[in-house]
Image (cartoon, helix red, strand yellow):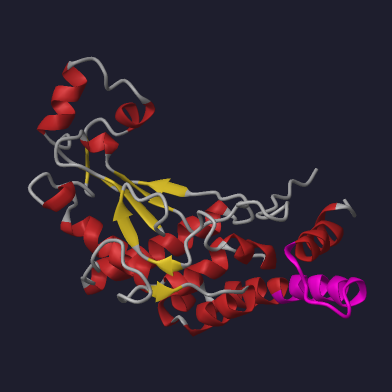
Amino acid sequence: SVLRCHSFPFPGSCGNGAHFNFSLWAEGEEADSTTKEFSKEGEGSDVVEEQTRGKCNVLKDASQTAGMSSVAQHFLAGILAHAPALEAICSPTSSCYLRHGRFAPAVANWGLEDRLAAIRVKSSPSQPASNCYIEFRLPSAAANPYLVAAALVAAGLDGLEKKLVLPPPQQTKDTGAKALPGSLKESLAALAADEVLSEKLGQEFLRWFSSLKQKEEEMIEGFLSKSVSGRDRTEADYCAAWRSSFMEEL
C-alpha cells in the first residue's frame, strides 16, 4: 500500500503541517540542577528523560538569555541561513505553498514560544533540560521526515562550524528576515544554488529529487491546462489537480 499525505487538501483551509521537533544531546553529566530536581520529584519519568539519562542537552545553558546555549544559537542560525533551500525539502509539492501565511511561515525567523515563526524555541532557564527543544515549523505534511532530518542537520552543522550569529527573534521581512520561496520552482532553484546543502546531500540526490519534482509539476500543469481556461487559477483548482494526479489513480 502507499500512503500519500496532502499538505493542502481543502480550499480555504490552513493546510497540514508536519513540524519537526528536536533537541541535541551529548554524553556527559546530567544536564543541570533543574533536571536533577525535576527527577527527584518523581515527575521526570517521561520518554525523553528515560532516553537521555546520563546525557546533557547541549541546547540548554541556564546562564544564557532564555536558557539557550551558544550551540543552540549557532545551530539555529545555520537553519535560518539555509531556510530558502530547506523549503524545497520541507514543502515538496506545489500545493504546499498555499499554506504560507496560514499558520505556516513565509519568512525565516525564530521566536520563543512563537507558534507562527519558522522556528519555535521552547526554552527557559528555570525549566529542566528535557523541556528544552526546537520546533522546526517549515515541514508540510507532504515532507519526507528523513530528508528533513538530513537537510536540517547539514544546515545546523554549517552554523556551528562557521559560528553563525543568530538574528534577533521575531524578525519580519522588513527587519531582515529572509523570505521563503513562494513556489516549488523557486525553492528548487534555492536548493540548487545552496553550496552547503548541495555538497552535504550530494549531487546524485539533488538530480534525482529535482527531476522527480519537476515531473510532478508537469503533471499538475498538464491537469490545470486542460481543466482551467479563461480565468485565474484558484486554490480549488490546485487541490483538484493534486488529487487527480496523485490520489485518485491509486
User: In terms of secondary structure, what is the magenta stretch mainly?
Assistant: helix
Q: What x and y, as percent, mark residue 125?
A: 14, 41
Q: Which residues are magenta?
A: 214-235
Q: What x and y, as percent, mark residue 188?
A: 58, 77
Q: Determine the image quadrant of residue 245.
A: bottom right
Q: Determine the image quadrant of residue 163.
A: bottom left
Q: How many marks?
A: 0
Which quadrant of the figure contains the N terminus? top right
Residue at 34%, 63% (x, y): give it.
156
Left or right: where does residue 119 sit relative to residue 245? left
The answer to whether residue 47 is above or below residue 171 is above
Q: What x and y, as percent, mark residue 21?
A: 42, 46
Residue nearer the viewer, 6 or 69: 6
In reply to whether residue 217 is colored magenta, the answer given is yes
Residue at far front of view:
231
Residue at far bottom of view:
193
Residue at far top of view:
42
Residue nearer the viewer, 243 or 104: 104
Residue at 35%, 64% (x, y): give it.
109
In reply to whether residue 103 is colored magenta, the answer given is no
The answer to whether residue 132 is above or below residue 191 is above
Q: What x and y, as percent, mark residue 190?
A: 51, 80
Left or right: where does residue 109 sit relative to residue 214? left
Q: Determine the image quadrant of residue 208.
A: bottom right
Residue at 29%, 61% (x, y): give it.
75
Residue nearer the viewer, 172 or 146: 172
Left or right: where does residue 157 sit relative to residue 202? left
